[in-house]
Amino acid sequence: MKLVSILCAIALIVAYADGRIAQQAGPSFAKSTSDAGDSPPAPRDAATEAQIREYLRVSGDADEFRKSWIAAVDKNRSIGAPYWPESFWQAVKDEMQKTDLVPMYVTFLQHGVSRELMQEVLDAYRVRGRDHFQGSPECFKLGTAVAAVQGEFEKLKLAETQAVILKVYAQYKPQMKAARARYLSDHPDWKDK
C-alpha cells in the first residue's frame, strides 16, 4: 500500500512538474488564475471532436505536452525508491509515449472552447501558420478561454498520469517487491519514505 502511495505522489509531482515545464517552454495554454471550482460552465455549442483533432494537428500542442510529460518522469525519479529498476522508469515513459491524449484534450477543450472560437482558431492557423499564430487575436481569445478552465486540464492530466503509472506498476509489482526485499537486506537501516 505504501508503494501505491509513493506512485501516486510521483504522479502528482510528474503532473505538476509537467505543467511547470510547459509554462517555461511557452505553451499555447495560459496559466489559470482561478481554481478548478471556479470554472465557468461549458459552452452550449462546444468545439467538436473533429475541430479539436484538427487543432491538435496544426498546433502541435499534444506533441509538446507529451514531450514535457515524459521529461517530468526523469526530473522526479528521486522520489521513487532506490531499488526501483531502470526498466520501470523506461516502461512509464514508453507507456506515456503510446497514450492517446486526444480524449483528454477533447474533454478539456470542449469544456471551455466554443465551436465558433475553435473555427476562428483553425482559420487563423490556416492563414498564419503555426509560427505566426502566437500573438494573434485568435491566440489571445483561445488563451483566455483555456485559462478559465485550466483547473480541469490539471485534473485530467493528473488522472492520465496516475493511470499510466499504475498500469506500469501492476506489471512490475512482483519485481519491485523482490527488489525491495533484497535492498532491505543489503541496507538494514533504510526506511521507506
Image (cartoon, rainbow, N blue to C red):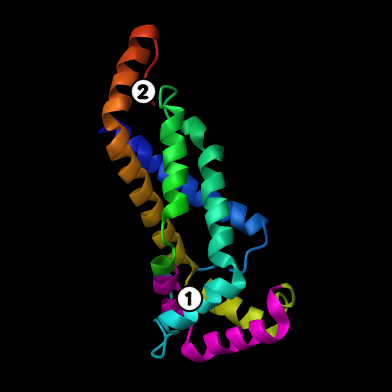
Residue 158 badge: none
Question: Circle 1 is placed at which residue position?
Answer: 53
Q: What residue range appears in magenta?
A: 105-130
Q: Nearer the viewer, residue 83 or 128?
A: 128
Q: How crowded is mark 2: few (under 14 residues within 10 Å), some or many (20 or more)?
A: few
Instruction: State the quadrant of the C terminus.
Output: top left
Q: Position of residue 73 (x, y in %)?
A: 50, 42
Type of amino acid at the residue the image marks with label 2: Asp
- Looking at this view, is 154 or 125 the one in front? 125
In the depicted structure, whether residue 88 falls above or below residue 49:
above
For marks 1 and 2 on the same chain, the one whose residue lies earlier in the sequence? 1
Residue 111 within the segment the image draws in magenta: yes
Question: Residue 10: x percent and y percent?
Answer: 43, 41
On screen, residue 152 above or below 1: below
Q: Residue 33 lies in what quarter of the image? A: bottom right
User: How far across and how far down the image is residue 43, in percent?
Assistant: 42, 86
Q: Which residue sits at x=53%, y=72%?
A: 56
Q: On the rendered structure, is 75 left or right of 9?
A: right
Q: How many marks?
A: 2
Quadrant showing the N terminus:
top left
Q: Name the residue under label 2.
A: 192
Considering the numbered disc 1 on the image, is that residue within a helix, a strand or a loop? helix
Does the segment drawn in magenta span residue 73?
no
Q: Distance between the residues labelled 1 and 2?
A: 43 Å
Observer able to see residue 40 = no
Which three-letter amino acid code belongs to the residue tagged 1?
A: Arg
- Disc 1 versus disc 2: nearer the observer: 1
